[in-house]
Each structure stands twice: as C-alpha cells, then as structure tokens.
Image: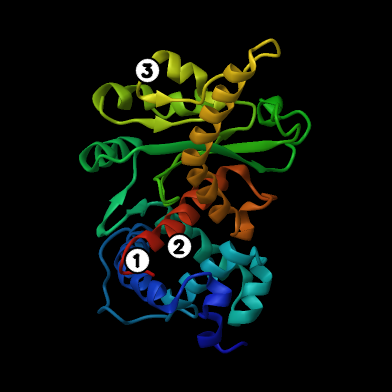
Amino acid sequence: MVDRTVLAHQLFTGISRQHLAFLVAELAGPWQAVVEGRRHAARGGARRRAAGAGARHRLVFVDRLVATLIHLRHDLPHSVLALLFDVDRSTVTRAVGEIRGLLAERGCAVPDRPGLRLRTLADVFAYAQAEGIKLRLDAAEIHTRRPAAGRGRRRAFVSGKKKQNTMKATVIADSQGRTLWSDALRPGRMHDATAARDEGIAVCFQHFPDVKVLLGDGYLGLRRDRPGQAVTPPRKPNKIALPHVRAAREEARHRHSSKRITVEHALADHKRWNRLTRWTHRRDVLPATYRAIAGLVSDRTANACP
C-alpha cells in the first residue's frame, strides 16, 4: 500500500491540497446522507444501534475522494487503485460511482463568487444578464467505443465531422476561458445547433433578451432565429469577391474568432483530464463524468480554490 498522503498530492489528483480540503468539507455531508439513505433502505427502517457502531469503512471518505480524482485525472483502472489503497476492486468501483455522482451535481463555479454554482442553462443566462457578460458557446466531441452489432441507434453516434463514434458535449465559457456550464452529452451524429436547442437555449434567449452568445459557423440556424443575441462570424467571402470586400470579411471573421477562442481554451482544460481523451467505458456514465470534470476545472475561478 502506498502512503495515502502521497496519493493526495496535486500530481496525482490534479488539484491543490487547498482545493481538496474544500471538496472534503463540501461533499462529506452529502456523501454521508447517501450512505445513511442506502442503509436505511437495506434494513427497512431506522438504525437500532448507536451511531458509530458496526463495521468500519476500509476506505474512508477522503480516500474515496482521492481515488476518484486520480481515476478522473489519469484514467487508472479500478484494480490498480484497489492495489494502491489496499482494498478490493469492488470497493473502489462503488466509491468512484458515489463520488462521481456528487461531483457531477455540484455545477460550475462563478468567478469571484465562491458560494454560487451554476447548474442549468437558465442559471448561466440569468448570471450573464445580471453581470453583463457575453457568453461563448461551443461543442466538443469525445471518441467512444463503437456500439455492439445489432444495437439500436447504432449510427446515431457516428460523427459526420470525425467519421468516428463520438459523443458531443456543449460548453459555455466567459471571456477569460472559465467554464460556466456543460450539458448532458448527446450522440455525435447530432448537429451542434440541435444539441443546443435540446438543452433549451431558445427559451433562454426569449427570457433573457439582453444576453449575447458568441458562436461558430455551426450555429447559423440560431443566428437566424435570434438575430442580435446569437452572434456568429460573417460568411466566408466567395471567389469572385472584390479584394477589399474579401479583406474586410476576413478581418471581421478574425476578430470574432479572437473573441470566441476562450471557449476553445476551456475545452482544452477539460481534455487535460485523461478520462476524456478517449472513452472506452459505458456511454451512460460519460455525461456525469464530464460534468464532474467541468465542475472541478471551473473551481479555479473561485478565489477560495487557486
């Protein structure tokens, strides 16, 4: 067994010790509530012995959190983590599932507001309108395994852009490249604008008319529906355009790209966690994993978690 204080180092978890301490303080209560709820359901009623009696956890909450962070950061198999923490593999699997769900429910941090979290698209639009922030939105695709032969909707995951099986994540960031929101992932074949519409972006545009979102060329349909709010770059100049028209159009596209590049930086921060470089596990677990990592990356925007 490796020294567990060494495993809690930033090189293994991807976050600082101060950040880890804040996570422990934030998630210990909800985790204990989940454990007591599961025990209550198993025994069919209230506990009959005093608190603290009975078997002890071989993997305490802090170790469960550290094991989950190492798994997300370096994509270590559960069997390897079980060897490092001297427990059974099933214990690590159960711990990762519990902590991953708690991390996914946290939402994203807000700059200079340590106690405020954004969990829905409506929260992001309300925050942007209150603070006068111009949002940046883009989608990223994560390679997944090809579904087994005979499975329904097998072609739904084949991306027209990547020509591979992928799932698509939509992310919103601010002008500093700080993650503000990530959605429930969609099959890779779905269009970027369709994925945003499925999350309710049209309703958010309607209820928050002062919010502007910088988008790429894949969201021209949103610009047609909400002109002035959904801002996309100008169309590329055609081959017969005059030189000065071509130069002006290219300059406008460059300025738009320079403003929107921050969301690309946010997506790059997510991909630094090896769990998202290529997904080789069950697809139904990927959305919670992505939201958990996006929340951890966004914590750096809070002053309490440098």
Q: In x, y percent, where is residue 195?
A: 50, 28
Q: Residues within 10 Å of mark 1 (few under 14, many from 20)?
A: some
In the rendered image, is residue 303 in sight?
yes
Residue at numbered disc 1: 27
Tell me the CA gap for discs 2 and 1.
8 Å
190 or 253: nearer the viewer: 253
Residue at image position (36%, 76%) is 21
Q: Position of residue 269 (x, y in %)?
A: 54, 55
**On screen, residue 93 above or below 256:** below
From what the image shows, is residue 28 above or below residue 235? below
Q: Tell me, yes or no, whether the two marked residues, 2 and 1, touch with CB atoms within 8 Å.
A: yes
Q: Quadrant of the C terminus?
A: bottom left
In the rendered image, residue 185, in percent from the top left (x then y), is placed at 53, 38
Name the secondary structure under disc 3: loop
Is any atom of residue 236 visible in this view? no
Q: Residue at x 66, y 50 (%)?
A: 281
Q: Which residue is mark 2?
A: 99
